[in-house]
Amino acid sequence: MLPTVDEAIMELQIAGELNPGPWVKHSKNVGIAARNIAHLVSELDEEKAYIVGLLHDIGRRVGIVNIPKHVYEGYKYCMAKGWGEAARICMTHSYVFMKDEFNYEPKSLEEKEIKKYILSAGEADEYDKLIQMCDALATDYGFVILEKRFVDVTRRYGIMDDYIKGWDVIFDIKESFEKKMGCCVYDVLPNIEKTTLLNPKPWTPRK
């Protein structure tokens, strides 16, 4: 199940009041990108794409910014609301390798629960892939080409293991969607030719 569009927008607004930051505008733009792309892909529902895009980072409502914490908090919150489809996206959006992401034994409770879920979730479906890609296309100030976003994230967090392999996965997802859309992904992202050229300082998350 999913919330309505209006409910999802309200949830994001409340979350932004609890934990203000550019992540809220980023989430809105992920939703817009997902909706615009889904509009041209017959197997996807654009309203569902919009909703799960809006809510993919909803775990940040609690003020925790690292990947496992916000992923797991978002999953728990959506499951408590009965929004299983959104809860899945909260789990999968940061793990582009899916089950192959976990070639180690996690130590934290959050990572243990995430690993358990991801291993049982099977292969990434089209909504998982869509939000994984849109997460890499959307900033708080608009839309950018993938290369720009990858540099932005790297400037913030540094290079982590398998970063480059993860970029390759996203480029493959982009190519797959473009075949289904019949056009370039960038063609449906408003003002990307302008926002890609902007160069704001990297956002530093709260610790």
Image (spheres, rainbow, N blue to C red):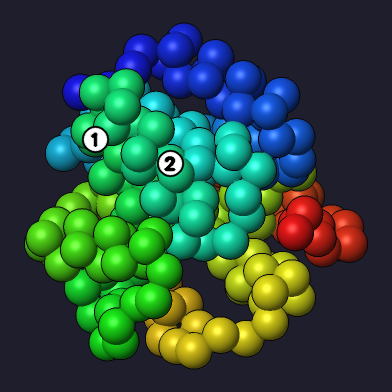
Residue 78 placement (x, y as % from top left) = 35, 31
Residue tagged by mark 1?
Answer: 85
Residue tagged by mark 2?
Answer: 74
- In the displayed structure image, the side of residue 24 where residue 204 appears, left or right: right
* Nearer the camera: disc 2 or disc 1: 2
Considering the numbered disc 2 on the image, is that residue within a helix, a strand or a loop?
helix
Residue 146 placement (x, y as % from top left) = 57, 66
Q: Which mark is residue 204?
A: none
Residue 140 placement (x, y as % from top left) = 71, 44
Tell me the amino acid under the disc marked 2: Gly
Considering the numbered disc 1 on the image, is that residue within a helix, a strand or a loop?
helix
Question: Where is residue 132, by image quadrant?
Answer: bottom left
Whether residue 26 is visible to the viewer of this picture, yes or no, is: no
Instruction: Categorize mark 2 by other alpha carbons within 10 Å: few (<14), some (14-19), many (20+).
Output: many
- Tell which of 48 and 67 is nearer to you: 67
Instruction: Please identify the quadrant where the N terminus is shown.
Output: top left
- Tell which of 99 and 35 is nearer to you: 99
Residue located 67% across and 50% down the image: 139
